[in-house]
């Protein structure tokens, strides 16, 4: 079993970087703009089905994690990831850009265009909880929901939301590596607690009214493949002769 933790970046710092005018830092301005256009197109494809209507049930009343999961995963699958990857790969290779800088620019653009929860889900009921299910956490921007009160399935407030991490393990029957997004919270004693290494479904939630205006849907970069296809040659960048003085 292998566990990997995502870094929780301070809310103010991360938001400032993502919102800065030159968030594609490390790239020439024209290339940064091209990357951003492609990422915007990915979001346009994904968000065509938004907002998805969610209803609540149970006590405490919590929004349907099944409907939320279907909505978010459908949006994710609407993106032409192969096409997006190819276009980004072409920009990278033609520009001769370092992989680290280019990946950072992609991640920053993905974060900058994240959609707030009230643009993702349509909720008409009041005093309901947004489920902290694995699927909701999978698409959650790293700085979102920080500090919001977390309530468990019995209605007990267990602490305040303190970030997302991933849990990976090999499937018992499939033999395939599976990744689950989980969360941590700070309890009343100021100690960090884990939500556990299991499927969350509707085990925990945060107040919808507090979450609604926070960013809730960020496309991940896990299916953006910048590797060159087998047998593909390095791009040729002809040298331009210097002008004679």
Image (tube, grey):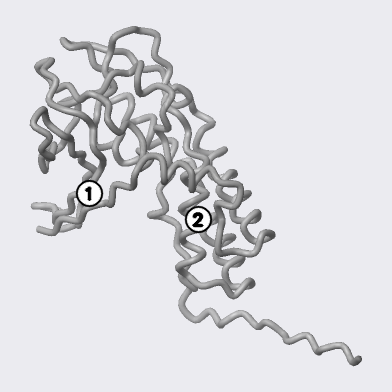
- Tell me which label, 1 or 2, sits earlier in the chain: 2
Q: Quadrant of the C terminus?
A: bottom right
Residue projecting furthest to the right: 245
Residue 61: x and y, percent?
22, 11
**Image quadrant of residue 208?**
top left
Q: Is residue 2 above or below residue 204?
A: below
State left or right for residue 52 relative to residue 180. right
Residue 118: x and y, percent?
44, 22
Q: Report the residue at 11% width, 27% height from top.
A: 188
Q: Which residue is mark 1?
A: 166
Q: Which residue is mark 2?
A: 106
**Image quadrant of residue 86?**
bottom right
Q: Report the residue at 52% width, 57% height from top.
A: 105
Q: Is residue 22 above or below residue 157?
A: below
SS category of the residue bearing label 1: strand
Q: Quadrant of the N terminus?
A: bottom left
Label 2 neighbour load within 10 Å: few <14, some 14-19, many 20+: many
């Amino acid at each position: 079993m292998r566990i990997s933790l995502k870094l929780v970046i301070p809310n103010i710092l991360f938001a400032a970087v993502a919102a800065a005018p030159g968030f594609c830092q490390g790239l020439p301005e024209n290339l940064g703009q091209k990357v951003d256009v492609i990422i915007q197109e990915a979001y346009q494809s994904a968000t065509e089905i938004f907002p998805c209507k969610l209803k609540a049930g149970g006590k405490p009343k919590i929004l349907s994690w099944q409907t939320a999961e279907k909505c978010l995963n459908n949006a994710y699958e609407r993106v032409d990831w192969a096409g997006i990857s190819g276009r980004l790969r072409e920009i990278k290779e033609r520009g001769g850009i370092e992989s680290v800088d280019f990946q950072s620019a992609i991640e920053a653009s993905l974060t900058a265009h994240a959609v707030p929860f009230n643009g993702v889900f349509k909720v008409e009921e009041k005093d309901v909880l947004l489920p902290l299910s694995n699927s909701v956490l999978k698409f959650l921007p790293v700085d979102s929901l920080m500090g919001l009160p977390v309530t468990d399935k019995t209605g007990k407030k267990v602490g305040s939301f303190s970030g997302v991490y991933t849990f990976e393990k090999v499937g018992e029957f499939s033999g395939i590596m599976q990744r689950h997004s989980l969360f941590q919270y700070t309890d009343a004693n100021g100690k960090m607690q884990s939500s556990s290494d299991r499927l969350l479904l509707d085990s925990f939630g945060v107040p919808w009214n507090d979450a609604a205006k926070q960013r809730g849907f960020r496309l991940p970069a896990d299916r953006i493949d910048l590797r060159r296809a087998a047998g593909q040659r390095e791009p040729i960048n002809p040298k331009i002769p210097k002008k004679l003085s």
